[in-house]
Structure formats: structure tokens, C-alpha cells
Amino acid sequence: MSDTDGKKPLGLRGGSTPGQVKQSFSHGRTKAVVVETKRKRVVVPKPGAGASGSGATNTNKPQGPGAGPTRRPAGISDSEMDRRLAAVRAAKAREADEAVARAEEERQREEERERRRAEIEEREREEREREAARKAREEEDAQRLASEAEAKAAESAAPAADATPAPKAERAPAGERAAERSPAKPSSAPPMRSKADREREERDSRKSREDGGRRSGKLTLSAALAGEGGRTRSMAAMKRKQEKARAKALGLGQKSEKQVREVRLPETIVVQELANRMAERAADVVKSLMKMGMMVAMNEPIDADTAELVIEEFGHKVLRVSDADVEQVIDKIEDASEDMHSRPPIITIMGHVDHGKTSLLDAIRKTSVVSGEAGGITQHIGAYQVTTDSGAVLTFLDTPGHAAFTSMRARGAQVTDIVVLVVAADDSVMPQTIEAINHAKAAKVPMIVAINKCDKPSADANRVRTELLQHEVVVEAMSGDVQDVEVSAITGKGLDTLLEAIALQAEILELKANPGRAAMGAVIEAKLDVGRGPVATVLVQHGTLRKGDIFVVGEQWGKVRALINDQGERVDEAAPSVPVEVLGLNGTPEAGDVLNVVETEAQAREIAAYREQAAKDKRAAAGAATTLEQMMARAKADKDVSELAVLVKADVQGSAEAIVQALEKVGNDEVRVRVLHYGVGAITDSDVGLAEASGAPIIGFNVRANATARNAAQQKGVEIRYYSIIYDLIDDIKSAASGLLKDEVREKFIGYAAIKEVFKVSGIGKVAGCLVTEGVARRSAGVRLLRDNVVVHEGTLKTLKRFKDEVKEVISGQECGMAFENYEDIRPGDVIEIFERETVERKLA
């Protein structure tokens, strides 16, 4: 087989033009390649194909007026043909209109570009003129300084010239010499060009860009033969260049000046937060820290000194602040007098338990709240609004009267304007009545005494007024300044008089608030609702609380998701002195916390985090401040103290707080109650786990355990007790704590016996011959040996005989023989004291 295999070898045909192309490679290598240029191929039609071809061509060209039928395709009617022709004409008309619109838009764009270009040229011209004027001033100053220097030099050289004559030469002026030394610079301001010149130059440059710039990337034969086959710019690069030129011509793309910010810097700050405060990219801040040798992520904290270096590196200003400065955004604002408007008074109902506080409020509101309370006593603090017949709006707070709810009454007195002290006419002043008086005096609020239950036969209103004098409460009936009203919640007697007294007192106080400022209020009660989450009952004191407001309350923060008034209706806002339930908290706050509305969510988070950390530090400091000696002394003191550990879960924060305070008072030096944990909401698995680990029962007050918690408690043997009345809860805890008390051992003297003679019996030892002088002597009783009324021995009897028989007891007036266990030092004349020990079960008071 030959090398060609029957194929024609490659070669240059006679009709082609040979040439060479120089190819360039990397590292400076080149190679010459022989190429050929082919002539354009001319297609010659075959004989006989012209007729058919011309016929085919003529079908597409009009043949004059009579050519219409020949142009129409087969099977097309006249109407269809007319429609097609009309569609073609309409399309051409649309194209013409679009062309006119495009031309108009192009003309407008061209005018806009021309206007911007003229503005840019005008600015450049003014800049050049200013630069030329500045340079001219500099040259004039330089010439003036040079002339002054020449003049000084001439004056100093005049004496020398007089002494030594020099050949005369024509001296040029100082200005000309300066001009000779420094050749004249051409003027920096170019001559003004006409509009036609600018258009011609732009057209030429555009043509050169189209011809040279865009076409230069293609390799033609002539360019290849000329050796121009190097690397050229791509089409994308050419487009970018054109875009830059267009943006420059329109004055776009100018880099904005960097804004210098004042960055508030606490002791520690997270890298991401630092970048946000500087308005910089977090990646740039991390890169800057890496250059300093700190490998940190954007969610890690850094100290203030390092952050200050970063801020200065980015060109911003540093404002060092402490962690406590975060609360400056909620500082108290002084309201202007013109912004103040009247607000409803806040009245707190206080008094002893079962004196009719809630019943009196029910009579005013015409409702029945007391029927819904367990045991018929109030165990929650309630807030209500009442509109009187005269149209006045009053806000009432109903506080519990039980001794365990001291903190609730204190909170009610702190946020109130007027205290209504309810005293039962048949029971008079009681301990919680005195406590309520003290709360009202501490809060410095006016008091109105409502003497309730005046409808009872045993009612004595004058006795109440007299007993109040002992506590420095002088009513008007006793020539004092405290209003007193006799009322009856059952019959409705005196209710109108009470409301008039409240309205009069409110009018004297002139209560006003600014509804236009950011809201501030006090948390009356807080709870954890299963369906709604954390819920806080808030009494607005200043400003207006609206739906969507961001707020911080104690260690919690949130955004108002819903506002519910005392009637259970949803409202959009709450004005001053209006109690509402607030939904949207991230946790359950403490009762008594202050709610403040802030501007941003970041501020609320920061304040809540600071308060939470401060509370943790305070608790840690309280534990760390204890010295080793104190810990040892406490452990030694607690060695003999028994503890009853319990877990408490309640429905609201105030009840949980009251139960914990009541349980802390239960106990004595030998036993005490320790609350391991207390909270709000249903009993959960975590509560059961904690109770199992500590061996403590779980106390549920108006709450229940969920299904999983009940099953876990049954499996782990954890006791769960449910209560709805605080009386029963405290009594049961007292009984359980009493079980930890050691039984009291009491001695009961049952008889005395005098030793007449001492005998020595073999096998027994010394036996005392005694006469029972008082009571009875028993074999099982304990005995003491008295010698000259001094106890010399205490023990038990080894034997008790009557004559020769062993007996259990010997009555008074009879003789018997006694022998002591392990003791024989007995003498005639000694006295034996016989007693019995009995154990008595102790209980906590």
C-alpha cells in the first residue's frame, strides 16, 4: 500500500495566491506558515435552467398593472388577499411610527447628552480658568520676589562698582532676566472650540472606535501577512471601555466622599455589631483584625481597645461608653405644660382579707368577680376601668388582703393615686388593715376610708373610726382630713357617695399626663399563657402604648402584638391610666417591673441583655463574697437544721412571689422550707427532673402538669400537689415541715422512795430496802439517786421485789427492795426519784 492510498497529495493549486503568515507563540517562539488565498467562486447557471429560474423569479416581482393574479398564491381569495395587504400596510405604518418614536427618543437622548457634556465642559473651563489665574498670580509673585532680590543685590554691589570700574554692559531689566532664566510656559487654557468642531471630532473618534477599536480584534489576511497577529482586546473589554467612557461623559461613576461616623463603643462588642455601627462590611473588619494578628469571626466579641484601633483605621471617631449607658435612651423626659392633658385617677382597693373589697368593686362595676375566685378570696391583683353615671372614667386596682400578698399590696400602693381602705364594720381594724395603712403612708397617697358591711346588725362604724385613730388616721367625722363613707356592697348603700368622694379627691390632685410621648407603665401582673405565651398586665402611666411598639420591661423585651382591655376586647392603643394585657414578650417579666417603649429592636435587645447580665453578676457576687470561715460556720450551723425542699409553679408571677415569701417564713431553728425553684406556667418535664434529683415535691398553684410531666412523675415517684387556695397550701407545708421536727421528750415524775437499809445479796449485789413515800414505783421506769438533794446517779432498776417476789410496781406506803443497774454506791438515807419519759409530737406554729 502506498503512502497516498489513492488520494491526491496536498498542494497549492494554480488558481490560488501563495503567501506566508507569521504565528506567535508563548516564550517568544514564532513560526512561518504558508497560506493560500482562494479566488471567489462564480456559479454559472446550467443551460435550460434560466427559464425556470426566471419564471420563479418573476412570480415574486410585480409585472405591471396586470400582474396581480400572477402574484397571488394558489387558493387565496380576494378578501383574504385584501386582509393580508391591509396587515402589511398596517405593519409598515407601525414600523414607520416606531422609527419616528425611536428617532425622537434618540434626539432627546442626544440633547440630554449634549446638555450634560456642555455642563461638564463649562465646569472644566471654569476650573481651567481658575487654575490659569492661580498660576498667573504665582508667576507675578515670583517676578516680584525676583525683582526685589535683584534690587537688593544691586544696592549691595553699588559700592564695589564705584571702587572697581567694570566694562559697561547693557543690563536687562530684572523681569526680562527672570523670563530668560525661566522660559515662558504656554497657557494651560486651550482655545474654545465651536460646536461644529466638537461634533466633527466626536464623529471622527466614534468612527475610529468603530473601525479601529472594534475591528482591531479580527485577524485579516493583510494583517496576518503584515505580521500583526498579536494578542488583542476582547469584545467584552471593548464594551467595558465604551461604558466607562459613556459614564464619564455623563458625569456618573464619581466616587462619593466617605462619611465619618461617631461610633459608640462599650467595654466589649461583637465584630458584626461593630461593623454595623461603622456602616462597613463585616468581612473588611475581620480582615483588619487578621492584619493585627487576631483570628476572630464576625460573631465573636472583642475588647474595647482593639475595637478602638479598628475604628481609627477605618477613619471614624470613637465614643467610649459604659455598659450602663445603654439605658440612657429611656431616661425620664420632662414634659412641657402645654402637652399635659387630664387623665383618669388610679384607685387601689386595700384592706384585710374577707372585708369585702372585691364585692364592693363588683357592686361598683355591676359584675361578679368574687364568685370566680377560689375560696371566695382574691389571690390576684386585678385592674379594671369603670365609667360612672356622670361620665367620669375611674381605674381600679383590686389587691389581695391575705397576709401572704404583702408585695402585691405594696405594688398597688406604688402605682396608685388614691387608696380606698375597706374596713368591715363588724370586724373593725385587723392586721392587714394596719399594713395597708402603712403602704399608703409610704407611697404618700391620699386615703379614703370605706366602712363596709354596714347592713349587718353587728356593724359599728364609730368603733372603726375610733380604732383608726390609734394608727394616725383621723376621718372627717372625727374632725380630720380623711374622707370616710359608710357603704354596703350587698345593698348598694353609699356607693354613689363613695364615687363622689373619689371624684372630689381626683379633682384636688389635678392628675395630668402627656399622651404624645413614648409610653411608660408598670407591670401589675405577669403570667405564662399556654396559647398566648408570656402575658403582662400593664398599667400605662405616661404616653400612649400602641400596637407594634417595641419595648423593654425588666430583663425582657418584646414588640406589642396585641392589646386587650379589661373587658377582653382588642384595642389598638392604651392611653395613660388605662390597664391592658400586653402580648408579644419574649419572656415572663417580674411583677412590678417598669415597661418603657424604645425606638429600635436593637436598643431593646441591648438593654434587656445588659439588665440580665447585671442581675447574674449581682447573684454571683452575692455568692462569691462569702469567705471560707463564713461558709464553714454556716455549714456547722446548718448541720442540725432539717430542710424541706419544694418546687413551686403558679399561674401568675405575683402569686408565685407571694407563695415563696410565705414559705420562707415557715420554720424555726430546727427546720425550714427551701424553695429550689419557682416559676410561672404549667408543670413540665424539667420540673419533674429537678424534683426527682432533689427529692422534693412539686407544688402547683392554679396550674396543672401536662401529660408527659404526669407520666414522668408517676414513673419517677415524684409527688405533685395541686392547690387553689393559699391557706391550704401553707397549712400543708407547715404540716410537712413539722414532720421533720424531732419529738419532744418529757419526764413525768411518778413517785419517791426513801432508802432505810442496804443489804448485800449474793448474785445480785447491793439491794436497797426502801419505803415508797409518794406515788408508785415501777420496774420499767427510770430512777435517779439523790443524796442531800443532789443527783449522784441516773439509770434504770435491775430488780424490784416485794418480799421475795419480783413485782412490776409498788404503791405508796409499802416497802420494797430495789437494785440499780451497774451501780452499787447506795447508802441509807438516800432518796430514789422514780420517773417515766414520754415523747410529744411537735408542730410548727
Image: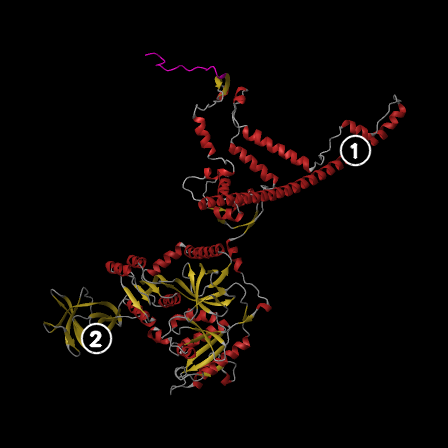
Image quarter hosting the N terminus: top left
Q: Label 1: how many residues lie within 10 Å, few (<14), some (14-19) or many (20+)?
A: some
Q: Are marks 1 and 2 in contact (CB under 8 Å)?
A: no
First reached walking from the N terminus: tag 1 or tag 2: 1
Write the residue at 50% across / 61% down: 597
Q: Secondary structure at mark 1?
A: helix
The CA span between labels 1 and 2 is 141 Å
Task: Please give the count of numbered marks on the rendered protein.
Answer: 2
Please name the amino acid that badge 1 sits on: Gln
**Residue 257 visible to an observer of this rendering:** no
Q: Give above or below for 537 relative to 149.
A: below
Q: Position of residue 644 (x, y in %)?
A: 31, 63
Residue at which label 1 appears: 143
In this view, the residue in front, 659 or 515, is 515
Q: Position of residue 841 (x, y in %)?
A: 26, 70
Q: Farthest left residue?
A: 804
Q: Farthest front residue?
A: 66
Specify the quadrant of the image occupied by residue 162. top right
Q: Farthest top residue?
A: 2
Instruction: Give the image's coloring scheme.
Output: secondary structure
In this view, the residue in front, 652 or 773, is 652
Q: Secondary structure at mark 2?
A: strand
- Give, as a single range, the part of the protein colored magenta: 1-17
Specify the quadrant of the image occupied by residue 461. bottom left
Q: Give above or below for 729 relative to 181.
A: below
Q: Label 2: how many residues lie within 10 Å, few (<14), some (14-19) or many (20+)?
A: many
Residue at which label 2 appears: 752
Q: Is residue 10 magenta?
A: yes
Write the residue at 69% across / 40% down: 127
Please name the amino acid that badge 2 sits on: Tyr
Mark 1 or 2, which is nearer the eye? 1
